[in-house]
Image (cartoon, rainbow, N blue to C red):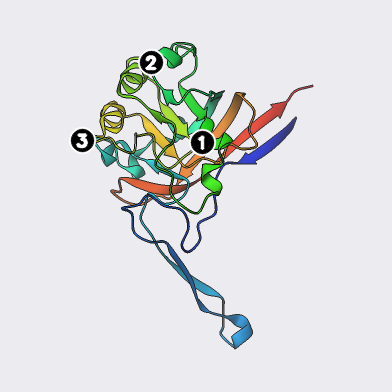
Amino acid sequence: MKYKIYDLSIPIKSNMLKWPSDPDVKVEQLSFINKGDRANFSKVDFGVHTGTHIDAPYHFYNQGLKIDELSLYDLIGEVLVVETESPVINKKFLKTIDLRRHKRVLFKTLNTGNRLLKKKKFSEDYVYISKDGAKYLASKKVKLIGIDYLSIEEYKSKNADAHKIITKNNIIIIETLDLSKIKPGEYLLIALPVKIKNSDGAPARVVLIKFNND
């Protein structure tokens, strides 16, 4: 069986792109073999929502599952990648997707087309999920959603409605996905967050696998 693996994760590095209110990212090497140390050794300092990461439902819902409680059966499985040029992911758009069949969906949007993840400066204008879109996803009992920028939420949102609706329904969120090399279609998703006890989120290595049965 032939297959191809696509890595959707962005590298974590010092001073990388982050949500404006999140702590700065610092990756520091503390010892060096070429300086006479026994081993190379590094430390990292950043928030759990840094880079490609998973939001546990607990992030915006106090009774929601925490990152170490998420089911591997939800994090690994068939996923649909949907491409859209809509400026917002709302109910009207979502009704064009068969969410009875597809319970994991990744959204490739204008965020990718505009190369927002390649920019050093945070962009306030990005594609997000609307409140009615979040309600529709919840009504369809979707297991997992992902998007190609730092948040599913509108930047100017005061109440974090999309996050609250989605997390209250124990839907897993993946943010900051690099979908630049991904074509729309069905894949096998493997999304594994760092297993941090009782955490609201964690960085993750997220990959898609495309099988070629020809």
Image coords of residue 16 (percent x, y): 48, 57
What kind of residue is marked 2? Answer: Lys
Residue under label 1: 111
Task: Say few, some or many: other residues with alpha carbon within 10 Å of mark 2 (under 14 / 14 to 19 / 20 or more).
Answer: some
Q: Nearer the viewer, residue 118 or 62?
A: 118
Q: State yes or no: discs 3 and 1 in contact (Cβ < 8 Å).
A: no
Image quadrant assignment for residue 91: top left
Q: Which of the marked residues, 3 or 1, is nearer the chain's N terminus?
A: 3
Give me the disc on residue 63: 3
Disc 3 to disc 1, C-alpha distance: 31 Å
Image quadrant assignment for residue 56: top left
Disc 2 to disc 3, C-alpha distance: 26 Å
Q: Which of the marked residues, 2 or 3, is nearer the chain's N terminus?
A: 3
Q: At 33% across and 23% down in the image, what residue appears?
A: 134
What kind of residue is marked 1? Answer: Asn
Image quadrant assignment for residue 113: top right
Q: Quadrant of the N terminus?
A: top right
Which mark is nearer the camera, 2 or 1? 1
Image coords of residue 28 (percent x, y): 48, 71
Which mark is nearer the camera, 3 or 1? 1
Q: At 40% across and 25% down in the image, what residue appears?
A: 143
Image coords of residue 11 (percent x, y): 54, 54
Residue under label 2: 91
Q: At 39% across and 39% down in the image, what residue appears?
A: 151
Q: Secondary structure at mark 1?
A: helix
Q: Quadrant of the C terminus?
A: top right
What kind of residue is marked 3? Answer: Gln
Q: State yes or no: discs 2 and 3 in contact (Cβ < 8 Å).
A: no
The reply, left or right, for residue 118 in relation to residue 18 is: right
Image coords of residue 198 (percent x, y): 28, 48
